[in-house]
């Protein structure tokens, strides 16, 4: 069993100023996930009549993208996986851990460690879709997709929108997220009709949401729980310049 | 419990959906377009630096060759073109490249500052290199260096030999001074770091990198950065150590 000192960002709501508050947790099993450790802390806080620490979580199996914390200065902590897939065996007895929310102009803090990531939804609604007629689903093999493109599109499609890329980026840029969505759809035949408009609209919305610009540092890819590569950002840039050459007018 | 965060009788938070922000219109508000401006202007400056470095190395051939090379730059295209036409075209293109590079950098720097209004209490570096981290401040120091460099060796305004001297005399006079040579050496090392990150970033911004090319692009960035840095350092260090006088 381990004992830990936690310094956690507490912030009542969007309008209040927050601060780091120190807590101690004891009886932490190395087999607990990081979120289970926070659950233990919260149970104790509730029993003490204190307010539990708010943090986002849902599936707890690394696929929904809800959880995301800055642990000792690294997005999702020391393993390249979501916080729910991080286990306490990655830490040592007596460790002091700083736990902060994602810090971004585009992700205002809702409470404590929970941030509002609806900016990502707005980037998606700006162009992260394809227009298909409803009705009977077409045969899966009706439109052939080259294997190479299918693989690259799938690699990009593994993005769960957790926001770690934004949190880790020294510029607070959302480029890895936007690029993953642009590459995912732009590589597939079904994504072609809206390809030019998509990249311009999504980058335009991203710039409007108080995210920074990419300076190709690579922190995003290094903490991405899905290992999405910097190559996708190059692909976005390529698509955007292609759209401009084809005469499209940017909305941003 | 050490401290109490805050007391909340009922642990509820009302959340409102975030406001949709309208994107700005206009090509040059787009961050990727700004970065493209940065990449293209950077490539123009790199091409100039290669030519500049080759010209500098003429100092090893002695004063006559060096000064006549300097004179040749001012007479390219004569007699078809008036004196200094080519030189002024090069100067204006470079000035435009510097101004655009600077504009894009400042604009993106400001955007990055807005993007993180509250800093982290603890932030660790996972991937970033020293070169990528220092690219902005290094660029600012290089801008100051360029101003001083023109005042010193082109205009002679801050050169001990003054304006009425040959380029070779100004070169030797400038680098016989240890602090001046030291400033030059530091600036060239910063240039090397700036190029090492900049060449990779420009390739990425222009959409030309992928997983297969990543090693080649990084290798190219190292080679160009090293060749230019060493090439620019050879002449001043040779003057400082008395190999050229």
Image (cartoon, grey):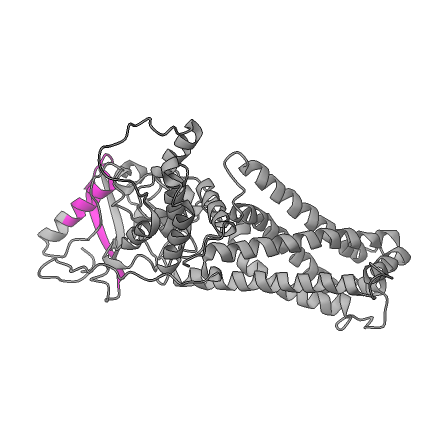
Nearer to me, B85 or B38: B85
> Which residue is at 38% across, 53% downward?
A201
Q: Quadrant of residue B66?
A: bottom right
Q: Residue at x 33, y 26 (%)?
A: A141
Q: Say which of A223 and B105 sits in front.
A: B105
Task: List x then y, in percent, for residue A136.
Answer: 22, 33
In the image, taking residue B238 as reference, residue A69 lies left or right, namely: left
> Is residue B118 part of the magenta span, yes or no?
no
Residue B38 screen position, x and y as percent: 56, 56
Numbered label tally? 0
Instruction: Please give left or right for residue B167 compared with residue A242 in the image.
Output: right
Question: For the C terminus of chain A, which image quadrant?
Answer: bottom left
Q: Which percent across, then down, holds residue B155?
A: 77, 70
Position in image of residue A9 (x %, y %): 26, 57
Magenta segment: A18-42
In the picture, measured across the screen, residue A90 lies left or right of residue B103, that is left
Looking at the image, which residue is at 71% across and 63% down? B91
């Amino acid at each position: 069993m381990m004992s830990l000192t936690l310094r956690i960002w507490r912030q009542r709501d969007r309008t209040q100023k927050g601060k780091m508050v120190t807590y101690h947790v004891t009886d932490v099993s190395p087999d607990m996930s990081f979120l289970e450790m926070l659950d233990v802390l919260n149970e104790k806080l509730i029993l003490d009549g204190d307010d539990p620490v708010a943090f986002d979580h849902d599936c707890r199996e690394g696929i929904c993208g809800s959880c995301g914390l800055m642990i000792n200065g690294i997005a999702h902590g020391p393993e390249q996986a979501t916080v729910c897939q991080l286990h306490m065996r990655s830490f040592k007895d007596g460790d002091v851990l700083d736990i902060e929310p994602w810090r971004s102009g585009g992700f205002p803090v809702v409470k404590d460690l929970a941030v509002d990531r609806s900016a990502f939804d707005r980037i998606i609604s700006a162009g992260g879709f394809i227009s298909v007629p409803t009705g009977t689903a077409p045969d899966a093999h009706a439109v052939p997709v080259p294997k190479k493109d299918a693989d690259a599109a799938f690699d990009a499609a593994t993005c769960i929108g957790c926001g770690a890329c934004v949190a880790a980026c020294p510029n607070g840029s959302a480029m890895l997220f936007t690029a993953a969505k642009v590459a995912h759809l732009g590589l597939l035949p079904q994504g072609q009709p809206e390809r030019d408009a998509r990249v311009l609209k999504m980058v335009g919305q991203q710039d409007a949401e108080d995210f920074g610009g990419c300076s190709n540092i690579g922190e995003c890819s290094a903490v991405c729980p899905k290992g999405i590569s910097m190559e996708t950002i190059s692909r976005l840039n390529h698509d955007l310049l292609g759209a401009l050459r084809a005469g499209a007018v940017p909305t941003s | 419990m050490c401290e109490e965060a805050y007391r909340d009788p009922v642990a509820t938070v009302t959340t409102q959906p975030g406001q949709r922000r309208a994107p700005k219109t206009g090509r040059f508000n787009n961050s990727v377009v700004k970065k493209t401006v940065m990449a293209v202007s950077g490539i123009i400056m790199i091409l100039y630096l290669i030519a500049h470095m080759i010209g500098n190395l003429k100092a090893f051939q002695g004063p006559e060759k060096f000064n006549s090379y300097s004179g040749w730059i001012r007479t390219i295209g004569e007699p078809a073109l008036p004196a200094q036409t080519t030189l002024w075209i090069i100067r204006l293109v470079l000035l435009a490249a510097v101004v655009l590079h600077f504009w894009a950098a400042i604009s993106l720097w400001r955007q990055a500052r807005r993007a993180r209004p509250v800093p982290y209490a603890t932030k660790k570096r996972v991937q970033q290199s020293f070169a990528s981290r220092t690219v902005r401040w290094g660029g600012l120091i290089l801008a100051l260096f360029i101003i001083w460099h023109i005042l010193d060796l082109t205009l002679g305004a801050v050169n001990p030999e003054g304006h009425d001297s040959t380029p070779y005399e100004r070169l030797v006079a400038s680098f016989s001074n240890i602090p001046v040579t030291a400033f030059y050496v530091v600036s060239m090392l910063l240039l090397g770091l700036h190029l090492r990150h900049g060449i990779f970033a420009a390739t990425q911004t222009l959409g030309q990198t992928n997983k297969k090319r990543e090693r080649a692009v990084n290798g190219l960035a190292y080679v160009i950065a090293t060749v230019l840095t060493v090439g620019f350092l050879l002449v001043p260090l040779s003057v400082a150590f008395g190999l050229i006088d």
